Image (cartoon, rainbow, N blue to C red):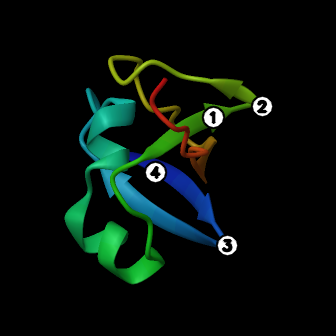
Amino acid sequence: MKTVNVRFNEVYTRSYHDSATIADVVGDQELKVVAGWGDNVRALVGGVEQPMTALAPDGGTVVIETRANTKAV
């Protein structure tokens, strides 16, 4: 198991399996409900946006940000 801090307004500490990806963290339904983020978000580690397939950092912090909505052209 690995421990990941997730920041979205507050910091939440969660345990995930060793092969957990950023998608697992972003898609954690229980955490999504408690923290209050929607589906249109991005995940950053160290200020850099991470692909959903990247491994979640053990002992690190994943910052969840809401993406800006854009109008279709």
Residue type marked 3: Asn
Query: Which numbered tag is attached to residue 47?
Result: 2
In the image, residue 10 lies at what x, y percent?
A: 66, 75
- CA neighbours of label 4 inside 10 A, class few (<14), some (14 to 19), many (20+): some
Residue at which label 3 appears? 9
Nearest to the eye among marks 3 and 4: give it.
Answer: 3
Distance Cα–Cα, label 2 vs label 1:
5 Å
Residue type marked 2: Gly
Q: Give the structural element (helix, strand or loop) at label 1.
A: strand
Q: How many marks overall? A: 4
Residue type marked 4: Thr
Residue at which label 4 appears? 3
Q: Are marks 3 and 2 in contact (CB under 8 Å)?
A: no
Looking at marks 3 and 2 on the same chain, the residue that comes earlier in the sequence is marked by: 3
Distance Cα–Cα, label 1 vs label 3:
14 Å
Write down the quadrant of residue 17 in the picture: top left
Q: Is residue 46 visible?
A: yes
Q: Are marks 4 and 1 in contact (CB under 8 Å)?
A: no
